[in-house]
Image (cartoon, rainbow, N blue to C red):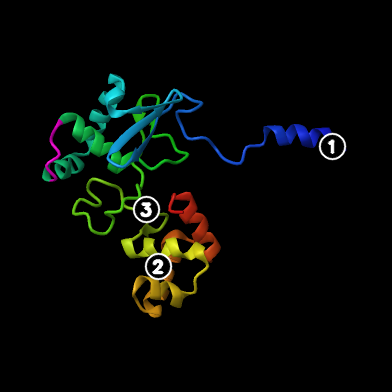
Amino acid sequence: MPNKSFIDAMKHCVSGKLPAGITDKNVEFLAQGEEVFALMQSQLLPLSDWPQWLIDAIERDMEKHPKAVEALVEADIVGRMEMIGQYVKCRYSALDNEADVIDGQLQRPEFTDCNLRGSCPYEGRLCELLKAPFGTLTHREIEVLRLIPEGLLDKEIADQLGISSLTVGVYMKNLREKTGAKNKAELVRFAFQKNLL
């Protein structure tokens, strides 16, 4: 018969943390396709159903980031709600374990994984670049970082990306320097923490 204290501990064991907004009063933003949602009070709300206090908090944050708003205007996104939705989508929609709104205040923008990375003219102005402890990762470094967990050799990564093995070696060196990682396992951990896997 198993130990009773072990069984009690097993009943309370959770392998991961729930996103904000499910069991707390914070808000987590996420996007699916063209739509952006707020996860709050255990509900997934489309932009049209967001409460006024949340819209006000986003607009206050937009006032603090004029370059992001300028990028929206350049992209011809000028309607009030359309701007708010795109602003949130580009700056806060990574579904992670960090609340995007705490006590009615937007937190720091996060790296959102977008298929326009590396080709978007507004990258770094509207959205956040991927910051590591000792530098900002380039689009190509992120591509290499994503392939590391597949267990590929540098030559295989090079073949997949259409670059030389020497170039992959340079990217690997840059990744270790920028993240502070000592090996591939630590790079995989960094990628996991940044929701790249």
Which quadrant of the figure has residue 10? top right
Q: Is residue 121 visible?
A: yes
Q: Residue at x 28, y 28 (%)?
A: 47
At label 3, the amino acid type is Lys
The residue at the point 52 percent across, 55 percent down is 189
Q: Residues within 10 Å of mark 1 (few under 14, many from 20)?
A: few
Q: Which residue appears at 36% of the width and 44% of the height?
A: 110
| Position of residue 177 measured from the top left corner of the image (x, y, whole percent) | 43, 65
Q: Which mark is residue 47?
A: none
Quadrant occupied by the N terminus: top right
Magenta extent: 75-79
Image quadrant where residue 53 sits? top left
The reply to whether residue 63 is visible in this rendering is no
Where is residue 175? Give x, y as percent.
Answer: 42, 64
- Residue 108 falls left or right of residue 56: right
Vertical placement of 51 versus 11: above or below? above
Kind of element beneath mark 3:
strand
Residue ranking furthest to the top? 52
Of residues 96 and 60, the one drawn nearer to the viewer in this rendering: 96
Q: Position of residue 159 (x, y in %)?
A: 39, 75
Cα–Cα gap, marks 1 and 2: 49 Å
Q: Is residue 25 highlighted in magenta?
A: no
- Residue type pointed to by label 2: Asn
Which numbered tag is attached to residue 131?
3
Judge whether 57 appears above or below 76 on screen: above
- For disc 2, the marked residue is 174
